[in-house]
Amino acid sequence: MTSTSRAPSSGTPAETTSTPSTGLLARLPKPSLRVQKGIALANVVAQIGIMTTGVTVRVTASGLGCETWPRCNEDSFVPVPGAEPGLHQAIEFGNRLLTFVLAAVAVALILALHRAGRRKQLLILAWLMPLGIVAQAVIGGITVLAGLVWWTVALHLLPSMILSWVAAILFVRIGEDDAAPARRVIPRPLTWLTVLSVVLLAGVLVSGTMVTGAGPHAGDARIGAADRLQLPIQWLVHFHAELMIGYVCLLIGLVAGLVALKTPGPAIRRCTILIVMIAAQAVIGITQYQLGVPEVLVIAHVTLAGAITAVTGALWAAGVLRDRATA
């Protein structure tokens, strides 16, 4: 059965579940729980994927392959021969096209959840996705029009990290029974460790954009030194690494506390996965620094950062759970 085939129990407030689908929406097939989770997973993957294509634009110096926005150049919305090197146009334009894929997935997710009559919490999270995508597209346009000034590039990446975090929470929540009461499974003292870990992760991501802003990959060969972050990159790298060390130490402490208190649910597993991913990220970061920041390792580093942010969102969602929905 679908996750919405039964009404909320008498113990669940009526306002926590959306009203049944009507009109044109009611003509759509009612999606099963598996379909809803599949679309939500595609949403997570797409959010991480656009970070991969975005950093590819940067390290291949294709950031101004499409020299304006929303057009690719003054005369056309699509690449044209001779305006810029063909490869740079193709890479930048391909990244722009992926925005439409993200939007399509987000719309499909909204329609599926509304048609299934899921609870309002899920609908709010789902609606945040297209709103964030539109905001991200506008920020991307500003980045191009500003000539890839380093702080605009940083602002262009960070919303994608937030969206991947929200997308992971939504994916976890979709698998829960709408009629079941929410219950806290991580004790409040340990919850503060979770909150602090999110704060440190935000610091890691922001400092990472600063490292990139002072590094060798400006996004286009015409970007001058005046448009780069004027701070010693060695200092920024160490600051970024120390924040990451603090983040992983908090996660180790969180795992120890969860194990000691025999905390039920997936929190321990997700926290352990995060620690392993961060260890892999540290290896990539140290290697790319020692090798002079090769392009392929930068792409891997940013992609894994997006995945780490998503798993952190899943860990956050593990603090308060409902019973699992039956498919």
Image (tube, helix red, strand yellow):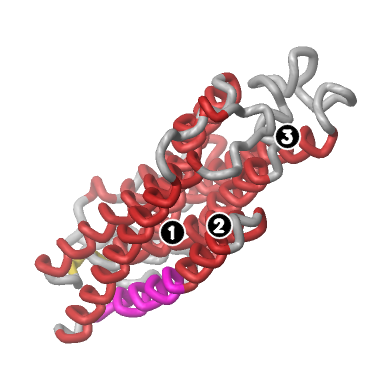
Mark 1 surroundings within 10 Å by alpha-carbon count, few (fewer than 14), some (14 through 19), many (20 or more):
many
Queried whether the magenta region covers residue 207, the answer comes back as no
Are the residues at dot 2 and dot 1 in contact (C-beta closer than 8 Å)? no
* Closer to us: 2 or 83: 83
* Closer to us: 117 or 122: 122
- Whole-angstrom CA distance, mark 2 to mark 1, is 11 Å
Secondary structure state at the residue bearing disc 3? helix
Mark 2 surroundings within 10 Å by alpha-carbon count, few (fewer than 14), some (14 through 19), many (20 or more):
many
Q: Which residue is mark 2?
A: 303
N-terminal-most mark, 3 or 2: 3
Closest to the camera, between mark 2 and mark 1, is 2
Residue at image position (55%, 21%) is 146
Residue at image position (44%, 62%) is 308
Mark 3 surroundings within 10 Å by alpha-carbon count, few (fewer than 14), some (14 through 19), many (20 or more):
many
Find residue 231 and report its horizontal and vertical position in percent.
40, 39
Find residue 46 and report its horizontal and vertical position in percent.
58, 51
Instruction: Name the amino acid type tagged 1.
Output: Ala
Would residue 82 be found to the left or right of residue 290 on screen?
right
Of helix, strand and loop, which mostly describes the magenta segment?
helix
**Residue 310, labelled with which disc?**
1
Q: Which residue is mark 3?
A: 93
- Residue 156 seen anywhere in this rendered image of the structure: yes
Please state the extent of the stretch shown in magenta in the rendering.
Answer: 264-279
Find residue 289 and report its horizontal and vertical position in percent.
53, 59
Queried whether the magenta region covers residue 274, the answer comes back as yes
N-terminal-most mark, 2 or 1: 2
The quarter holding residue 191 reads bottom left
Instruction: Name the amino acid type tagged 3.
Output: Phe
- Residue 117 seen anywhere in this rendered image of the structure: no
